[in-house]
Amino acid sequence: MSVKEVNANLSDADLQEIKRAIDTIQNKLPFLMTLSAEERKQLYKLGDKRLPFVQNSLNAAQNNRNILPASFDYDGFANDYRLATTLTDLRMRLRQLTEQVDDTLLAVGSEAMVSSLTVYDYVKTASKKTPGLKAIAEQLGNLFKATRARSAKPASDPSPDKN
C-alpha cells in the first residue's frame, strides 16, 4: 500500500489558534502533574481490566456507607473515579490525535527526505562542472552521513506504561 502524498499548508493564524486551543486545554486541567519514573512505579495502575473493580467498589461503598469508617472520604473516592473515567476518555481522544500527527509527520518528513536526496544527487552531479557546488555537495554529504550514523543507533521507547 502506498502512502498518500501530503500536500498541505498550515497558516500562521491557524497555528496560533491551535496553540491557543492547547493552552486552553492545559488551563482547563490545572491539576495535571508530572511524575518521576520512581513515583510511577509506586502507584497502582488503573487500566481497563481494573476499572470494573473500582466501579464495583464505588457501588459497594455507595450502597453500604454504614460499614465505612467516618474517616473514609466517600465523596473524594467518587470524585476520583469520575475524574479517572473522564481523563481516560480524554486520553483516548488525545492519543488518536497524537497518532494522526505522528503519522502525518512521518509521511511529510519522508517526502522532504526524498526530495532532499534528489537535490543532493543533482548537486553532486552538477558539482563536477559547476563552480561553487563542490563545497555544498560535501556539506550535504557530511550531513547525510551524520544522520545515517545517528539513525543506526537503536532508539529507546520513552512512552509510559499503557496500564
Image (cartoon, rainbow, N blue to C red):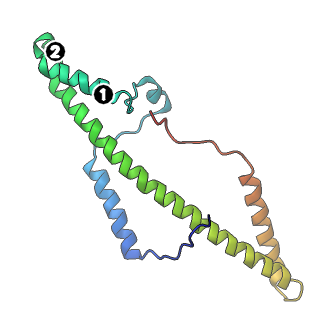
Taking 161 as reference, is 25 above or below it? below
Q: Quadrant of the C terminus?
A: top left
Which of the 4 image quadrants contains residue 3? bottom right
Q: Which amino acid type is marked by label 2? A: Ser
Residue identified by numbered label 1: 52
User: Which is more N-terminal, label 1 or label 2?
Assistant: 1
**Residue most extreme to the bottom:** 130
Q: Quadrant of the N terminus?
A: bottom right
SS assignment at label 1: helix
Residue 160 visible within the image: yes
**Residue most extreme to the right:** 128
Q: Is residue 151 left or right of residue 3?
A: right
Residue identified by numbered label 2: 71
How many numbered marks appear?
Answer: 2
Taking 12 as reference, is 130 above or below it? below
Q: Position of residue 41 (x, y in %)?
A: 47, 26
Q: Residues within 10 Å of mark 2 (few under 14, many from 20)?
A: few
Q: Nearer the viewer, residue 100 or 112?
A: 100
SS assignment at label 2: loop
Q: Residues within 10 Å of mark 1 (few under 14, many from 20)?
A: few
